[in-house]
Image: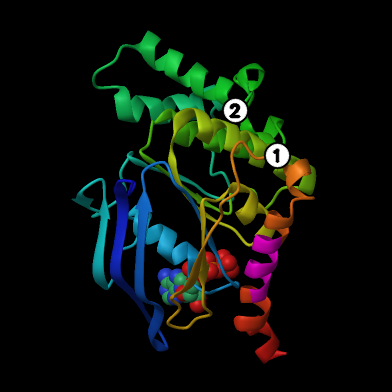
Amino acid sequence: MAAKKFIEVRGAEMVFETRKGRFHALRNINLTVAQGEFITLIGHSGCGKSTLLNLIAGLTEATDGALICAGREIDGPSPERGVVFQNHSLLPWLSCFDNVYLAVERVFGAREDRNKLRERTAAALAMVGLTAAGAKRPNEISGGMKQRVGIARALSMEPKVLLMDEPFGALDALTRAHLQDELLRIVANTGSTVVMVTHDVDEAVLLSDRIVMMTNGPAATIGEIAEIRLPRPRDRVALALDPLYMEYRTHVLEFLHRRQANPMRAVA
Ligand SMILES: Nc1ncnc2c1ncn2[C@@H]1O[C@H](COP(=O)(O)OP(=O)(O)OP(=O)(O)O)[C@@H](O)[C@H]1O
């Protein structure tokens, strides 16, 4: 019954060399993610969620420990691990279509012709409901649409893993809810493995198979992992009244606000 191990983080440590000396950000991180699993990382600001995601993305190298994806050591960024950031990072001078096309070309350009590459690009834009916006530039579309182009770009590379750093953090509540639903639908169709950073407890419970709760830094680590056994497909309106949903929500809130009280309060 055990699902296949897909990402493995073993004893990862992250120490940054700063002007003020060494800063121990992450300590003894151990996490195994199965293929097709949806994992969220949650914790107070500055605890090291992005740092952990960047280690898995291969954008930062751990000071110690081992990180493995699909049986190979993670030793740099790779198209097999698609990254979506909060600030969508689109190239402003290119159309939405061309922003996605560029990524498609980079991954498949050596073995596929232009028609096929265009087909892939169109399919990725269709997946996020943006076929009609393909010709527009990023400054001509809304924040939510930009974020969807970012997701289309990551998905177009057919990554084995989608790594998302607060992808909906800058959006209004309605757009955010809409994109969460869309992400659930897309992931159900593609079977992608997802690791996503969030601050939002409801988002975490709605989307996750497991929620990884991190302790406060410095030397943050995984405090607890909550398994979310809510059946899929999940419906946000029905869940709002589901006692199990409330229980998970309260459990995560309890961890964040009682067991790991907000570190900012200590400063105030
Ligand atoms: N390149 C770096 N050099 C030095 N310190 C760093 C570096 N990157 C992150 N840190 C520190 O490591 C800690 C974790 O940062 P990180 O950005 O991972 O936190 P986070 O949980 O993602 O925060 P937030 O929720 O506010 O985005 C912080 O104290 C941060 O200042």
Q: Which residue is mark 2?
A: 128
Q: Is residue 163 visible?
A: yes
Q: Is residue 215 magenta?
A: no
Q: Is residue 169 visible?
A: no
Q: Is residue 143 shown left or right of residue 5?
A: right
At a point 53% along the width and 80% down the height, the residue shown is: 216
At mark 2, the secondary structure is loop
At a point 57% along the width and 27% down the height, the residue shown is: 96
Q: CA distance from mark 2 to mark 1?
A: 19 Å
Q: Nearer the viewer, residue 123 or 28?
A: 28
Label 2 lies in ligand 1 vicinity (Cβ under 8 Å) = no
At mark 1, the secondary structure is loop
Q: Which residue is mark 1?
A: 235
- Image quadrant containing the C terminus: bottom right
Q: Is residue 15 shown left or right of residue 152?
A: left
Label 2, residues with CA under 10 Å away: few <14, some 14-19, many ≥20: many
Compared to residue 143, the image places residue 57 above or below, namely: below
At a point 60% along the width and 48% down the height, the residue shown is: 230
Query: Quadrant of residue 147 in the image?
Result: top right
Residue type marked 2: Val
Residue 200 at x, y = what percent?
Answer: 66, 59
Q: Which residues are magenta?
A: 247-254
Compared to residue 42, the image places residue 34 above or below, namely: above
Q: Is residue 248 magenta?
A: yes
Compared to residue 74, the image places residue 43 above or below, namely: below
Residue type marked 1: Asp
Q: Earlier in the sequence, mark 2 or mark 1?
A: 2
